[in-house]
Amino acid sequence: PVVMIGQDYVGVGHGNITNPIGPKNVFIGNRIGLALDTGSGYWNFCGGEECGMSLRDGFENVFIGNHTGRLTRDGWYNTAVGVASFKDNVDGINNTVVGFGALAGSASGNSNTTVGTFSANNANGANGFVAIGFNAMRCLANGSTPCLTNELGVYIGYESRASANGTTIEIVIGWEAIGNGSNAVTIGNESLS
């Protein structure tokens, strides 16, 4: 592997940036931080193949896992851990993402928390939601239509689902529980009595 240590910069791996402008970045893995030769991003930590490879002006991001935060360019205060998590996000702010493929399809979105494999995998442009559990907030009620734009919702449980796209303050708790729309709370699925 290639090891580069510069003023306020550490890079380990092949194909990483060779002339960073932004200070205090640490990159471990191949093809990381390639856009920092034209940007001013700083205090980023990236570990994994193509992790954070598009960072330009983003700052204080932590990306761990192959392809994690791959397209993030201008986002800040994001933490993503898990292979391919947060991979399509470009400019999100204040997101916490943990799990394989979690919040992977989001190009934007702020102040979201996802924990679990594929949790909120399709959400794009949604803000302020919480998705915890395998496939939580990944699909709508029918189990196949992607959940995209729900705001300020809470989805907790294995495959907990939103009732529709565009809901606000929908709270869904339970195994395969399905929400009942905006400003509604659902606890449990239809098999509970």
Image (cartoon, rainbow, N blue to C red):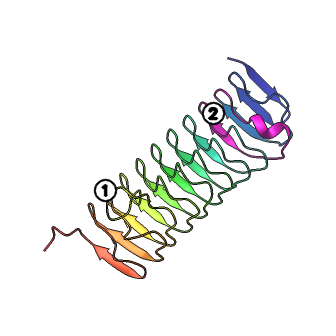
Residue at the left extreme? 193
Q: Residues within 10 Å of mark 2 (few under 14, many from 20)?
A: many
**Residue drawn at (19%, 70%), measured in percent from left and top?**
190
**Residue drawn at (59%, 63%), measured in percent from left and top?**
125
Residue 49 in the magenta stretch? The answer is yes
Q: Nearer the viewer, residue 193 or 79?
A: 193
Residue on which the image places disc 2: 50
What secondary structure is marked by label 1?
Answer: loop
Give the image location of residue 121, x and y in percent. 47, 52
Q: CA distance from mark 1 to mark 2?
A: 29 Å
Q: Nearer the viewer, residue 64 or 136?
A: 136
Residue 33: image quadrant is top right
Q: Residue 158 — which label? A: 1
Q: What is the number of callouts on the image?
A: 2
In the image, what residue type sits under mark 1? Tyr
* Contact flag, marks 1 and 2 (Cβ < 8 Å): no
**Residue drawn at (71%, 36%), measured in percent from left and top?**
26
Residue 70: image quadrant is top right
Left or right? Give the position of 115 relative to 85: left
Q: Nearer the viewer, residue 47 or 83?
A: 83
Q: Residues within 10 Å of mark 1 (few under 14, many from 20)?
A: many
Give the image location of residue 179, x and y in percent. 34, 72
- Magenta-drawn segment: 29-52
Q: Is residue 108 above or below residue 64?
A: below
Residue at the bottom extreme? 183
